[in-house]
């Protein structure tokens, strides 16, 4: 399959390497000029679990330099970069590729459908992970899986082809029954762990050891529940709380600092507007009180402003 990875950071690069190794024709597309230059000069450097480095020759392009067509565009920018990337890829999208995103956060479908008909969009969640070491260099850990669904299944007959392509690359993909429920579940988890660990400057285990972690958790998730109920989205605050509690031990994710914490440490914008911020906006629109998520999104934005000013 001819595949573009639009947003070839940590995750996009990991997906790109795996899909190319399985025989697909993969192009990495990215707006970070140093990253694109490093990949074209030296290949994509991948540090694996055992600490070994291997360089993979890959083609990387800035969006403005893309002239070919693709069967599939995998969008792996951060959520707040998605609209710009889709704007930059206007000419590529005119050829009607399928567009898949597994990015975190709620609201990605609304962003993509401004540029692409719903009948071409596939969304999902993934527990694969990856980190950026620097331009042209990623560090990958463990394995993962993917759960995905076409936004308009009746008009998207080729989901099996995409799933087969991902699975031929060893990516453990399967169809989701209710992808919006999966997206909200992951966003609920991230809106607790990412947001509080960032504000409190702690890892997941330290958050879980706080005597009031449950009060903090419930302040976020009770509002998620009320908004999801009003929007008719399947959501269980108690299931998400159980999932969160399962992350606290050192054997799971206790020692891990969530991605929002890392973004803040690197003085990069966070995805909070597509987590607590999204629920705050939707709650306001639906007349559901959302004071905790609204103030948490504001606090993250205040912290972003403070670290950027330093
Ligand atoms: P990333 O920050 O590594 O890359 C996203 C984009 O930002 C890329 O276009 C990248 O080139 C650009 N970028 C990164 N650092 C930059 C820098 N210093 N200067 C200029 N541009 C830079 O993001 P990611 O971790 O690949 O995440 C993509 C999406 O996948 C997000 O929605 C994220 O929440 C989600 N996700 C990530 C992981 C993970 O383990 N990283 C796991 C699951 C889901």
Image: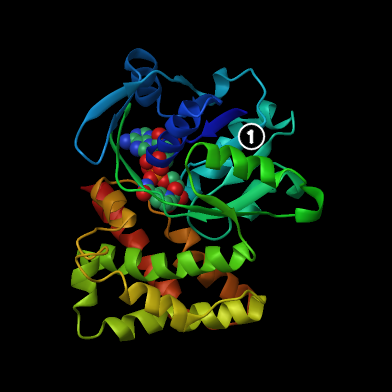
| Figure check: 91 above or below 310 | above
| In this rendering, position of residue 85 left or right of residue 144 | right
| Figure check: 19 above or below 223 | above
| Residue found at x 35% / y 19% | 43
| Residue found at x 49% / y 43% | 81
Tell me the quadrant of ligand 1: top left
Name the residue tied to disc 1.
72
| Figure check: 50 above or below 186 | above
**x and y, in percent, of residue 89 in the image:** 62, 30
**Which of the 4 image quarters holds residue 33?**
top left
Characterize the local packing of mark 1: few (<14), some (14-19) or many (20 or more) Cα atoms within 10 angstroms. many
**x and y, in percent, of residue 169 in the image:** 50, 36
Q: Which of 240 and 300 is in front in this view?
A: 240
- SS for tag 1? strand
**x and y, in percent, of residue 131 in the image:** 31, 42
Q: Is residue 161 at all visible to an observer of this figure?
A: yes
| In this rendering, position of residue 303 left or right of residue 218 | left
| In this rendering, position of residue 139 left or right of residue 273 | left
Q: Is mark 1 within 8 Å of ligand 1?
A: no
| In this rendering, position of residue 205 left or right of residue 111 | left
């Amino acid at each position: 399959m001819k595949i573009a990875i639009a947003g070839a950071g940590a995750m996009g690069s990991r997906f790109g390497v795996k899909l190319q190794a399985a025989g697909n024709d993969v192009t990495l597309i990215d707006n970070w000029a140093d990253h694109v230059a490093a990949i074209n000069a030296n290949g994509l450097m991948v540090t694996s679990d055992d600490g070994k480095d291997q360089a993979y020759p890959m083609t990387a392009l800035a969006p403005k330099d893309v002239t070919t067509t693709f069967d599939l565009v995998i969008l792996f920018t951060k959520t707040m970069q998605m609209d710009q990337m889709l704007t930059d890829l206007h000419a590529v999208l005119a050829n009607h590729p399928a567009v898949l995103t597994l990015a975190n956060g709620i609201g990605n479908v609304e962003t993509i459908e401004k540029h692409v008909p719903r009948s071409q969009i596939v969304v999902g969640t993934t527990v694969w992970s990856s980190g950026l070491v620097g331009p042209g260099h990623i560090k990958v850990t463990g394995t993962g899986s993917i759960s995905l669904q076409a936004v308009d299944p009746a008009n998207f007959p080729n989901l099996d082809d995409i799933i087969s392509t991902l699975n031929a690359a060893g990516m453990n993909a399967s169809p989701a029954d209710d992808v919006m429920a999966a997206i909200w579940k992951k966003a609920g988890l991230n809106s607790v762990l990412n947001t509080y660990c960032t504000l409190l400057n702690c890892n997941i285990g330290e958050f879980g050891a706080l005597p009031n972690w449950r009060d903090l958790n419930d302040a976020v998730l009770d509002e998620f529940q009320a908004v999801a109920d009003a929007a008719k989205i399947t959501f269980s605050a108690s299931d998400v709380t159980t999932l969160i509690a399962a992350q606290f031990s050192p054997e799971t994710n206790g020692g891990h600092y969530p991605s929002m914490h890392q973004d803040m440490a690197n003085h990069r914008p966070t995805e909070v507007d597509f987590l607590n911020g999204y629920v705050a906006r939707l709650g306001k629109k639906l007349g559901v009180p959302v004071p905790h998520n609204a103030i948490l999104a504001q606090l993250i934005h205040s912290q972003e402003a403070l670290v950027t000013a330093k």
